């Protein structure tokens, strides 16, 4: 999600329109679940996926139409019946997707969403009552549950914060921050592990057997003090008390 958001923001900052397609619901066996996204422009796919194959081709066509007329649309795809058999769509389920055009006026919201993802993450809330003009709101996990985007009613905010929100006129999609891999130690195992991981923050946890400079393969090369303390605490905890088994 973070890389797709970065690409989207860069695209909109350059003045180029784009279309965002999201799986809002699925029934039965489907190639992707709710919350899967792809980004497209007039030339076709930019990033992401909703499952590939005919379903993705139809989604890209819906994105092209949304960019052409400036209206969002809901797309229902049934991976059943004769059409599915002819196109090898063997999943057998159903997908509902929202394909919406985006322009520079949408940039402030997606910048705020990207900022939230760089911290604790956020909930992305899409008002589906007018499918041709969906309205987006966000609720950050941190910052005291800071809301941004289109204002939500107080009762909706309270329900979202308490986890009891169930209004089907809204599509609520969790957007957690990217997973991080923390390597503690600089031995012969750590370096190839970091190379495979490609993005590996490091922390100096020993006076002689740690060489952070040999592990830094990305710009994110330092941990916060709380992260560092957490790692060091885990390393100093006996294995049997860390939920692990010695056998």
Image: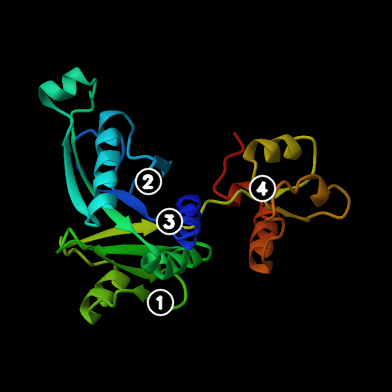
Q: In which quarter of the image is the C terminus?
A: top right
Task: Classify 93 as above or below 41.
Answer: above
Q: Residue drawn at (34%, 51%), measured in percent from left and top? A: 19
Circle 4 or circle 2, nearest the eye: 2
Which of the numbered marks, if any, corresponds to residue 242?
A: none
Circle 3 or circle 1, nearest the eye: 3
Marks 3 and 1, the one that precedes in the sequence: 3
Q: Residue drawn at (50%, 51%), measured in percent from left and top? A: 3
Image coordinates of residue 27 in percent, x first then y, are 18, 40
Marks 4 and 2, the one that precedes in the sequence: 2
Describe the element under mark 4 as helix, strand or loop: loop
Task: Classify 158 as above or below 181.
Answer: below
Q: How crowded is mark 4: few (under 14 residues within 10 Å), some or many (20 or more)?
A: many
Lateral position of residue 233 relative to residue 179, left or right: right
The residue to which callout 2 is attached is 40
The answer to whether the residue labelled 3 contacts the one labelled 4, judged by CB atoms less than 8 Å apart, is no
What is the spatial separation of the Cα atoms under label 3 and label 4, in whole angstroms? 33 Å
Describe the element under mark 2 as helix, strand or loop: strand
Task: Classify 92 as above or below 185.
Answer: above
The residue to which callout 3 is attached is 16
Marks 1 and 2, the one that precedes in the sequence: 2
What is the spatial separation of the Cα atoms under label 4 and label 2, in whole angstroms? 30 Å
The residue to which callout 4 is attached is 200
Marks 4 and 1, the one that precedes in the sequence: 1
Front position in the image: 215 or 108: 108
Image coordinates of residue 216 in percent, x first then y, are 75, 49
What is the spatial separation of the Cα atoms under label 2 and label 3, in whole angstroms? 11 Å
What is the spatial separation of the Cα atoms under label 4 and label 1, in whole angstroms? 29 Å
The residue to which callout 1 is attached is 146
């Amino acid at each position: 999600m973070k890389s797709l958001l970065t690409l989207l923001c860069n695209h909109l900052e350059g003045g180029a329109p784009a279309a965002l397609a999201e799986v809002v619901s699925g029934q039965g066996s489907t190639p992707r679940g709710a919350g899967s996204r792809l980004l497209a422009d007039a030339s076709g796919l930019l990033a992401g996926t909703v499952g590939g194959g005919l379903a993705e081709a139809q989604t890209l066509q819906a994105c092209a139409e949304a960019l052409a007329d400036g209206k969002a649309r809901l797309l229902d795809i049934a991976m059943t019946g004769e059409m599915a058999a002819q196109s090898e769509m063997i999943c057998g389920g159903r997908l509902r997707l929202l394909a919406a055009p985006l322009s520079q006026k949408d940039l402030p919201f997606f910048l705020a969403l990207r900022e939230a993802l760089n911290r604790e993450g956020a909930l992305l809330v899409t008002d589906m009552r007018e499918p041709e003009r969906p309205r987006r709101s966000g609720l950050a996990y941190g910052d005291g549950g800071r809301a941004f985007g289109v204002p939500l009613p107080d009762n909706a905010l309270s329900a979202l914060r308490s986890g009891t929100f169930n209004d089907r006129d809204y599509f609520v999609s969790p957007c957690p921050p990217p997973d991080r891999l923390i390597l503690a130690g600089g031995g012969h195992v750590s370096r190839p592990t970091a190379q495979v991981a490609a993005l590996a923050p490091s922390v100096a946890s020993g006076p002689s057997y740690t060489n952070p400079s040999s592990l830094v393969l990305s710009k994110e090369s330092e941990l916060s003090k709380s992260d560092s303390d957490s790692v060091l605490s885990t390393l100093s905890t006996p294995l049997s008390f860390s939920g692990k088994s010695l056998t």
